Image (cartoon, grey):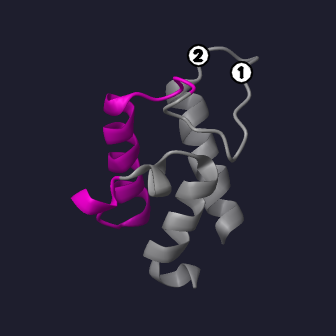
Amino acid sequence: MTERFESTVREFIAENFLFRADVEVSNSQSLLETGVMDSTGVLELIAFLEQTYGITVADNEIIPENLDSIDNMTRYLASKVPMAA
């Protein structure tokens, strides 16, 4: 299931934040530090995750450890989505 999370998140990032086809994002790369996403992008990402996976991202969960890289988001989703375990 984590592969599905990774694929879906990567596709969302590519479609919404990568405006050049030659830009590659590694799974461990910080999306904020590299400028792929800004604070508004984080809000868009949260809305996408909540709608796509039927979860609620609490204010105290909006931290880099959960949302700053594809790896972090995959782990976060695996802990939040009921059927992932």
- Contact check, label 1 and label 2, Cβ < 8 Å: yes
Is residue 68 depicted above or below 13 in this figure? Answer: below
Locate the C terminus by quadrant.
Answer: bottom right
The residue positioned 35% from the left and 56% from the top of the image is: 51
Locate the N terminus by quadrant.
Answer: bottom right
Q: Which picture quadrant has residue 30?
A: top right
Which residue carries the number 1 mark? 23
Let me know if residue 58 appears in the view.
Answer: no
Bounds of the magenta segment: 34-62
Please say whether residue 27 is one of the residues in the magenta stretch: no
Is residue 39 depicted above or below 69 in this figure? Answer: above
Please say whether residue 46 is one of the residues in the magenta stretch: yes
User: What is the crowding at mark 2: few (fewer than 14 residues within 10 Å), some, or many (at least 20)?
Assistant: few
Look at label 2 and name its amino acid.
Answer: Phe
Residue 82: x percent and y percent?
A: 46, 82
Mark 1 and mark 2: span between their CA atoms?
8 Å
Which residue carries the number 2 mark? 19
